[in-house]
């Protein structure tokens, strides 16, 4: 069955610290992989996506993600978080139909 | 200009009523979607249209009926509203499938009392 797992419901990091949000998926073939961010009261915005090529993908707002086929993972990283990064982050996979993970809420400590 | 707009932003209604949510995109995209986000933030696709044609219809109660009068609009009509329909409904659009970025509207928070 196709699925997306974000094992961390909440993550708290200090401003300026590095960040890694985990995402694992189960899919029949290599799917399109996405990370979206949702700020409070708003819709989702695409941070980055991957299908093929270089397994390290750069996105907007200083985010990057690394695809690891052997681990079926697509983890999101940022070297130094800012208070404005506090939001809900969704990993998503699929092709014609996109399946979203349950999200990771990121809290930033000043 | 707003890329994907939804009206209304908030909708409070009683059980048993019928309501509609409207969505419009000015991006020239061919594909539009409706998603439901529950109270735990879980986001699930309900429907997808490509050039006014239904291409994805998940296991959604038939009280929910999407309508696409043209490729820039996708409306959602809900009959006989139930408490469990309370959620945030998001409209989205993309240039096509597969693999394209989806552009989301701001959401409609539906509360059924």
Image (cartoon, rainbow, N blue to C red):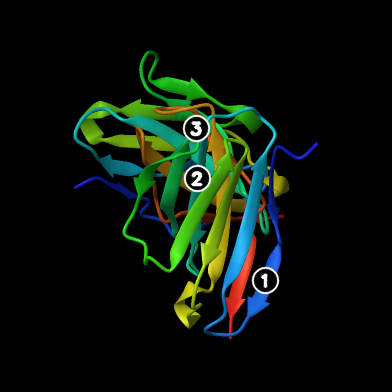
Q: In the structure shown, which secondary structural element does the residue marked by tag 1 occupy?
A: strand
Q: Nearer the viewer, residue B6 or B67?
A: B67
Of mark 1 and mark 2, the one earlier in the sequence is 1
Q: Name the subunit of mark 2.
A: B
* Residue found farthest to the top: A53
Q: Nearer the viewer, residue A47 or B61?
A: B61
| For residue A45, side relative to residue A53 (left or right) | right
Q: In the structure shown, which secondary structural element does the residue marked by tag 2 occupy?
A: strand
Q: Name the subunit of mark 1.
A: B
B21 over B52 or under it: above or below: below
Establish whether labels 3 and 2 are both on one chain.
yes
Q: Which residue has dot 1 on it?
A: B11
Q: Nearer the viewer, residue A59 or A96?
A: A96
Q: Position of residue A9 (x, y in %)?
A: 44, 60
Whole-angstrom CA distance, mark 1 to mark 2, is 19 Å
Q: Which mark is residue B33?
A: 2
Residue at image position (46%, 30%) is A65
Structural crowding at the residue carrying mark 2, measured as other residues with C-alpha within 10 Å and reported as few (<14), some (14–19) or many (≥20): many
Establish whether labels 1 and 2 are both on one chain.
yes
Of mark 3 and mark 2, the one earlier in the sequence is 2
Structural crowding at the residue carrying mark 3, measured as other residues with C-alpha within 10 Å and reported as few (<14), some (14–19) or many (≥20): some
Q: Which residue has dot 3 on it?
A: B51
| For residue B103, side relative to residue B40 (left or right) | right
């Amino acid at each position: 069955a196709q699925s997306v797992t974000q094992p961390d419901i909440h993550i708290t990091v200090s401003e300026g610290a590095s960040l890694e949000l985990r995402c694992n998926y189960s899919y029949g073939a290599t799917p399109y992989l996405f990370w979206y961010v949702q700020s409070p009261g708003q819709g989702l915005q695409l941070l980055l996506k991957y299908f093929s090529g270089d397994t390290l993908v750069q996105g907007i707002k200083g985010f990057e993600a690394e695809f690891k086929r052997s681990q079926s993972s697509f983890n999101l990283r940022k070297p130094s978080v800012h208070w404005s990064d506090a939001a809900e982050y969704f990993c998503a996979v699929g092709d014609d139909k996109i399946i979203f993970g349950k999200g990771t809420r990121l809290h930033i400590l000043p | 200009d707003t890329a994907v707009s939804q009206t209304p932003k908030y909708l409070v209604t009683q059980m048993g009523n019928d309501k509609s949510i409207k969505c419009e995109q000015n991006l020239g995209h061919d594909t539009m979607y409706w998603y439901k986000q529950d109270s735990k933030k879980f986001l699930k696709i309900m429907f997808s249209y490509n050039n006014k044609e239904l291409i994805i219809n998940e296991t959604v109660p038939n009280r929910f009926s999407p309508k696409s009068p043209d490729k820039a609009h996708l409306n959602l009509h809900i009959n006989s509203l139930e408490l469990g329909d309370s959620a945030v409904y998001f409209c989205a659009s993309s240039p096509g499938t597969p693999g394209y970025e989806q552009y989301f509207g701001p959401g409609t928070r539906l509360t059924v009392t």
